[in-house]
Image: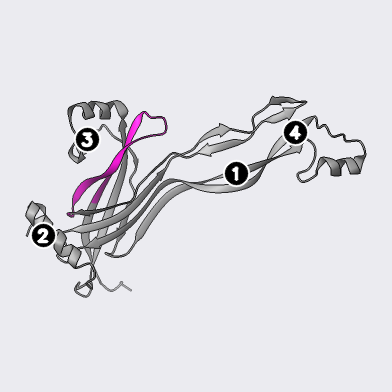
Amino acid sequence: MNRHALTTAGVLAAVAQFACAQGATSTEPEGQIPIIEVSLRIVQFPKKTIEALSRTNAIDQASILALYSEGEGELISAPVVRARPGSEASVRGVVEYIYPTSFADYPSGQPAGVTNELAQSRTGQLTNTVAETVVVPQDFATREVGAILTVMPELSPNRQLVHLTLTPNQVFPPTWKDYGIRKVSGALTGRTCEQPFFPVFTFTTQITMVPDTTALLAGGTPNADGTKMIYALVTVKVSEVEGKPVPK
């Protein structure tokens, strides 16, 4: 049967057959390994475009694909993974951000860890009033920024349906906000303690698809500044790798 010509009844019957065969062992001929390729596209559209679409039509898979094919969308990332059925695969393209998570006040000119009392005992001159205080980072954390995709693909016995369990994670570069201040002779000046805010687009879902098709997985969430709306599209393909000796 041509897998592109499946009827609705045929798809439902194949889904039922696929569900019953989840615990069955593979019967692939020796030397033939099915490979499932999963291609994810994270796309954002102008909010005004989505608003106009929502007033005249449902925001569904067909309308989002039509917008993208017309060049309306902006591609954010497009991770691709290839894996054998039943084997989890992941891909990540990230930049690590290291940032402080706690701060402490220290008198200017004193090394970290030296208290007022200790400094006074050493010099005999320091009073309880400190003219200037600096804020020093104490602890740090790391956050990965970029695209991460984890997929568990499964293939029906007749190879006409692919079941995907996937968790995309798109973390955008942070915006920073100052919380720290520097005290000089009782006055507040010079903000010095910035904290990052990481916009994130992520979800976990399961979907059953016909190979060589594209589906809308999730979306409709705004970006960090609220001017764009983010959606996720997935395309799945099935291919075979024939086992052959490596030439010497």
Judging by the rendered image, the residue that carries numbered circle 3 is 59
Q: Which of marks 2 and 4 is nearer the N terminus?
A: 2
Hey, what amino acid is under mark 3? Ile
Disc number for residue 13: 2
- The reply to whether dot 1 and dot 4 touch (C-beta < 8 Å) is no
- Where is 97 relative to 71, above or below? below
- From the image, which quarter does the C terminus lie in? bottom left
Judging by the rendered image, the residue that carries numbered circle 4 is 133
- The reply to whether dot 2 and dot 3 touch (C-beta < 8 Å) is no
Please state the extent of the stretch shown in magenta in the rendering.
210-235
Count of numbered tags: 4
Q: Describe the element under mark 4 as helix, strand or loop.
A: strand
- Examine the image and state in which quarter residue 128 appears: top right
Judging by the rendered image, the residue that carries numbered circle 1 is 101
Q: Which residue lies furthest to the front in this view?
A: 128
Per the model, the C-alpha gap separating discs 1 and 2 is 54 Å
Callout 4 environment at 10 Å: few (<14), some (14 to 19), or many (20+)?
A: some
Q: Which residue lies furthest to the top in this view?
A: 187
Q: Describe the element under mark 1 as helix, strand or loop.
A: strand
Q: Which of marks 3 and 1 is nearer the N terminus?
A: 3
Identify the residue at image location x=51%, y=47%: 143
Q: Which of marks 1 and 2 is nearer the N terminus?
A: 2
